[in-house]
Image (cartoon, rainbow, N blue to C red):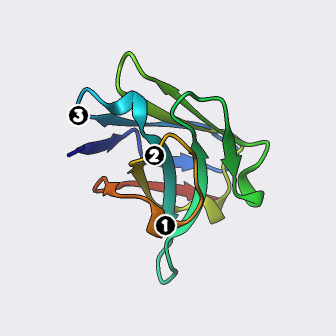
């Protein structure tokens, strides 16, 4: 069992930066691929970024490429999402998810554990 707790969300003006953190419980964090998803009001949850267990592979949704960076610190059981050049369309609840596999994935169904989410609001 893995428990995930996100933090770092908040209100930011367009063009600003935020760093989200997701702290995981359990000693097997290093074996899990991790991912960030987001859900905007009235929309379905969508993939943002994922990272393999070893951090050797990362994947990004097209609209965040070059602006967002996913990373992890296995010694701290934490995965991060650095968000730069924020846009109003980035406004959403951001969820951290863990997959019982070392290989990164982009599909929501492939992730087994989810956090409660953290709100990110970007004003224009």
How far separated are the C-alphas under marks 2 and 3? Answer: 16 Å
Q: Which numbered disc, 1 or 2, marks the residue closer to the eye?
A: 2
Q: Residue furthest bottom?
A: 42
Residue depicted at x 46% and y 49%: 11
How far separated are the C-alphas under marks 1 and 2? Answer: 14 Å
Quarter occupied by residue 21: top left
- Label 3 neighbour load within 10 Å: few <14, some 14-19, many 20+: some
How far separated are the C-alphas under marks 3 and 1? Answer: 21 Å
Horizontal side of 82 relative to 101 (left or right) equals right
Q: Which residue is mark 2?
A: 101
Label disc, if present, on residue 25 of the rendered structure: 3
Q: Which numbered disc, 2 or 3, marks the residue closer to the eye?
A: 2
In x, y percent, where is residue 89? 64, 65
- Label located before the other in sequence (2 or 3): 3
Q: Which residue is mark 1?
A: 108
Quadrant position of the C terminus in the picture = bottom right
- Label 2 neighbour load within 10 Å: few <14, some 14-19, many 20+: some
């Amino acid at each position: 069992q893995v428990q995930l707790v996100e933090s770092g969300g908040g209100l930011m003006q367009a063009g600003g930066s935020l760093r989200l953190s997701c702290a995981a419980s359990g000693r097997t964090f290093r074996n899990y691929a991790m991912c960030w998803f987001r859900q905007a009001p009235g929309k379905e949850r969508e993939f943002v970024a994922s990272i393999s267990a070893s951090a050797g592979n990362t994947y990004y949704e097209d609209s965040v490429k070059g602006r967002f960076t996913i990373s992890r610190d296995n010694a701290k059981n934490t995965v991060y999402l650095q968000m730069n050049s924020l846009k109003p369309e980035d406004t959403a609840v951001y969820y951290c998810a863990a997959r019982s596999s070392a290989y990164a994935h982009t599909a929501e169904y492939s992730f087994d554990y989810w956090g409660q989410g953290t709100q990110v609001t970007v004003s224009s």
